Structure formats: C-alpha cells, structure tokens
Amino acid sequence: MIAPPLVVATQVPPATRIYRPVLRAMSQTGAAALASGLLSALATKVIAVAGGPAALATLSTLQQLRQAAVVAATGNGQTALVRGSSALSGRERSEHVRTVACLFAAATALVAGSMILWPQPLAGFGAGAGRLIPWLAIPVALTSFLVFASAVLNALGAIGRLAMLSVIASAAMALGAWPAARAFAVGQRSALVALLTFSAAVSVAAALIALVGFHGRLEGWFHGPGSWWSGKAARSFGIMSVTLLASGLAASGALLAVRRHILFTQGLIVTGQFDAAWGLSMNQVTLVLSSVQTYYLPAVAKSRSLTERDGHISSVLTVAALTAAGVIAGIALFKPWFLRMLYAAAFEPAAAYLRWTLLGDYLKVTSWILSIPILAAGDMKMFLAADLVAYTVFVAVATGLPPARTAASSAAIGFVAMYAAHLLLCAIYLRLKLRFVPARRTLAGWVLGLAVVTAVSALNWEKT
C-alpha cells in the first residue's frame, strides 16, 4: 500500500507554474459544481411543483436507495481506484485497473441481481419501493459503471471532461423532471425511476465519449502485459475502500450521536436550527474542496520527488485556504441573510452556531488538504486513526461541556475542536513521516486567511 519512495529534488519550479494547474482545476471543477448544483435545484423545484410533496419524497427515497446500492456495488472504491491508477505504473497499474474492473462488475451484478430477484428487504423504505426496486437496478448498474469511468478519467487527468459529466447528469435530471413529475401525478410511479435511468444513461454516454480521447493510453491499461486478476491489487483496493467506508460510517455515527444529544436536551426546533448551520457550513466547504479534489489526489500520488510533492501540497493549500477564507468571511458578514434565503426566518438563531462552525470550516479545509498525502502514501492506519480521534474529540466536546453551554453551542464548539485535532495530527505526520516542509508563502497565506476569518467572525460575532 505504501507508495514508491520519493527522491529529493532541489530545483524549485516557478510560482506561476505551481499555481497555474491548481487555479485551472479550481476554475473548471468549481464552475461545474456550481452549475450542477443550480441544475439540481431546478430539477428539485420542478418535481416539487409538478408532482407535489409525494413525488419529491418518492424521488428522495429512490435516490437514497440507489446511492446505498452503488456504494455496495463499487465497494466505496472510487478514491482507491484513483489513487492506485495514479500512483502505480506499467504492469502494476494495468493489473490494478483490471482487477478493480472485475470487482466492480461482480459486485454490481450481485447487487443488481438481488434487487431484481429479492426486492422485499428494501420494500420497507416506503414510497411504493417494493414495486420500483427491480427497475431501480438499471440506474444502479449504469451509475456503477459511471463511478468506474469517472475514476479512470480522474487518474488520466481529464479534469475538464470529468467536471462536465456532473453538469450533464444534472442537466439530464432537469430536462426530464417535468414529464416525469407529470407522469407521477397521474399514477405512473415508475416515471421517477425512468428519470434516474435517463440521467444515468446520458451520463454514461458522455463518459464513453470522454474516454474515447484516451484510447491509446487505455489500450495499454486493458490490453497490455499483466493478468486480469491480481491478489495484491485486490488486497490494496480492499484495504483502502474498507478504511474509507469505516471513516464515513464513523463520521455519520458521530453526527447522529451529537444530534441526538441536542434533540433530547433542546428539542426538535433547535436541532433543526443546528442542522441549518451545519448544512450551510458543509455546503460551502464542499464547494471549495470539490474544486481541487479531482486534481489534488492524482497529482500527489504521481509525484516522484519530495520537491514535486511538496509543491503540489503547498500550492493547493495556499489557493484553497485563501479561497475558503474569502467565502467564509462573506458568509460571516451576512449570516442572517443567508439563513433567511436558504431556509426561512425561523432559522436565524442558527447564526449563533455559525460563529463557531465557520471557524471550524477553515480548519477543515486545511486538515483535508494535509490528509490527502497520507491517503496517497497508502498509510490507511494513520488516515483512519486521525479521523477516529477527530470524531471522538467532536463527540466528547459536544456532550461534555458544562451545562452553562447549550447542547447546540457545545456541538458547534466541538466542530472546531474536531478539525483542530485532525489538523494537528495530520501536520505532525506530514512533518515527521513524509518530511513535508511548507513554502514560506504557503505559511504566510494560511496565517493571512486565518486572520481574516477570525477578524470577520469576531466583528460579526453578535450578528443574528
């Protein structure tokens, strides 16, 4: 699992050459994420208006079932595939890609077949799911292939084409939303499954077209030397996939425990307000991180010298930190307005929790950037340990502060403590194990961003 050893290179690339690919990736992926989000919001709006609450509830249920099935069909392995395809070369890379393709195909066939032959276990999710689940196997299979194709495009460095896939998928949903909702309104419940199938099919077609441009390189990956099954590649893929799945489950469990604490101590209304602050924080951080993640992991995994790898880390950290600082400062200035616009006036008290979660967002961006090199190096024990320690800190602070602090406020403070702990652990590991030394301009940019976030938050602390 450990990446090949890096050699020391003394020649430092010019700053313009370091930042150019990061800025290009952020502009492509960030713009695509924004466009995709707007199109998804449009599709949701159309479904709600034309089909009513029942249509929206049914679509949400089907999407959740599809997502769970796709996780099972792919082993939650998109990141593992990207890392292996980027870090390895020659015969090892070919065997890794082929082995993962076999695993995806077998797991997808098992999941889709189970949905067709035994839909009863999932029928309890409501929304007439029992009758729709067999048909849902089609978009599940298509989405599984799309996950594989997207990971391959990511490893190939096709960031622009990959960004367009998300836009195309959301555009297909928006295009088919009206006829699907109208058909649902007259009793054709399967129309919403057809909508998901249509969107997935269009996305798969776009992915195949995007892959055609890399025919020469893919020929070597799939028809070059090497076997179609490698036990070593399967173990490497499995360890990383299981680790990432465990981390995701731990994150969900920690949040559920904290939400339960808020619910039982302050009630449903305050819990909803906390959820609004949490959602606003997560969405803006996701927008910043999604704009660099497709570029960052493959770039670090492919690095063959300390200077090259440190340059990637420093450049992404500088650009992402300053971008996050600007976004966070803007939200801190207009907290009540954002809460009214995105939710309702009843959610304005959530501004008190945003005081803390916005500070935590800046630390989260930094800690995420420092955790990716650990993932690229294949040290999954450290990656999982850092996550588990952070989630433990979150729950401990959220539930253990003195009664003078409300449960929701304690949870918001715990969010800051969680990412402070995660950042510290990742920074220590990178310095001691990976010998990462950030550039001076990176440190200066990060300190500047922290100062901006802290100052704006302090000046608007009481704004509710």
Image (tube, rainbow, N blue to C red):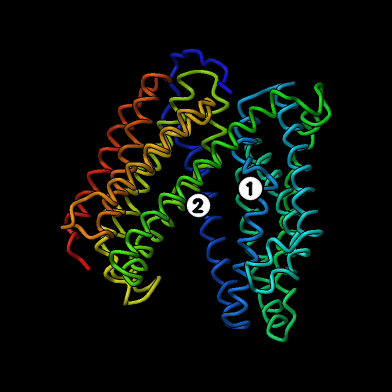
Q: Which of the 4 quarters of the picture holds residue 3?
A: top right
Residue at figure coordinates x 60%, y 43% from the top left: 159
Which of the two discs, 1 and 2, labels the residue nearer the N terminus?
A: 2
Mark 1 neighbour class, 10 Å CA radius: few under 14, some 14 to 19, many 20 or more: many
Q: Is residue 138 visible?
A: no
Q: Which residue is mark 2?
A: 30
Q: Percent x, y for residue 397?
A: 27, 47
- Residue 162 is marked as 1
Q: Secondary structure at mark 1?
A: helix
Kind of residue indicated by mark 2:
Gly
Along the viewing direction, whichever of 389 and 452 lies nearer the viewer: 389
- Gap between marks 1 and 2 measured at Cα: 12 Å
Kind of residue indicated by mark 1:
Leu
Q: Percent x, y for residue 262?
A: 32, 61
Q: Is residue 390 above or below residue 174?
A: above
Q: Quadrant of the C terminus?
A: bottom left
Residue at figure coordinates x 64%, y 33% from the top left: 238
Q: Is residue 136 above or below residue 43?
A: above
Q: Which of the 4 quarters of the picture holds residue 410?
A: bottom left
Q: Percent x, y for residue 359?
A: 28, 49
Q: Secondary structure at mark 2?
A: helix
Q: Percent x, y for residue 303?
A: 54, 24
Residue at figure coordinates x 75%, y 73% from the top left: 190
Would residue 262 be found to the left or right of residue 249 on screen? Answer: left
Along the viewing direction, whichever of 320 and 379 lies nearer the viewer: 379
